[in-house]
Image: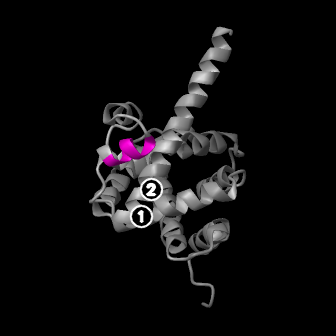
Amino acid sequence: MTKAADGGLRHRKKALMRQQLQQHALRLFLSQGYEATTVEMIATAAGVSHMTFFRYFPTKEDVVLADEYDPVLVARLAARPPTEPIWEKLRHAVLEGLAPLPAEAYAVLLQRTRLIFTVPALRARQWDQQHATEALILAALGYPTGERTAWVLVAAGLATLTTALSIWAEQDDVSALPNIINTAFDALLKGRLPYE
């Protein structure tokens, strides 16, 4: 086996283990509650040791919060036209990143989103991570982190996305997320309610 093939296989095996740990964690969180579920329970359900769990996720919160969406978002933002307004770039980058996801990935995202909005520890960590995401987006758009006008626009765009996720989490239609995101960004761009 070549070194490149071996590295690809290792990467796929690691991604599969992360996915399995997350699936077991979500199942346990939903069946017995987030607080009542320990890392040891998640590891046991996945057939690994708790030390193996920590090789993949530094904390219990990270098994819910960790995903691959930020790098996808950054890549999509970098590919958008340079003259496109920030909120349109963000809207299209998010929607383009979600488009190839299979239905089961939306279902997992919905479970994770519901947990984040209902568990205070996860909500607090998500808030902290949102600031890191703002910095990534500013860098992807070519703005320094301290550029205040761009920071306000990016933060408003992320707040719009967070609100769309919150609305989606209250529904049972897994496939509704793209439409909810579009409606939320339409409201932001128009600056008024649809019936005004």
Amino acid carrying mark 1 in the image? Leu
Q: Is residue 26 left or right of residue 171?
A: left
Amino acid carrying mark 2 in the image? Leu
Query: Can residue 123 be seen from the camera position used here?
Result: yes
Q: On screen, 91 above or below 21?
A: below
Q: Position of residue 40 (x, y in %)?
A: 30, 43
* Quarter location, residue 104: bottom right
Q: Main secondary structure of the magenta part?
A: helix
- What segment is highlighted magenta in the picture? 41-46
Q: CA distance from mark 1 to mark 2?
A: 6 Å
Q: Is residue 58 magenta?
A: no
- Secondary structure at badge 2 equals helix
Q: Residues within 10 Å of mark 2 (few under 14, many from 20)?
A: many
Q: Position of residue 76 (x, y in %)?
A: 66, 44
Query: Looking at the image, which residue sits at the far bottom?
Result: 195
Image quadrant in which the N terminus is located: top right
In-front residue for pair 146/169: 169
The answer to whether marks 1 and 2 mark residues whose Cβ atoms lie closer than 8 Å is: yes
Q: Which residue is mark 2?
A: 26
Image quadrant in which the C terminus is located: bottom right
x 31%, y 55%: residue: 37
- Secondary structure at badge 1 equals helix
In-front residue for pair 120/42: 42
x 57%, y 26%: residue: 11
Q: Is residue 12 left or right of residue 63?
A: right
x 37%, y 47%: residue: 42
Q: Position of residue 135 (x, y in %)?
A: 44, 43
Q: Which residue is mark 1?
A: 30
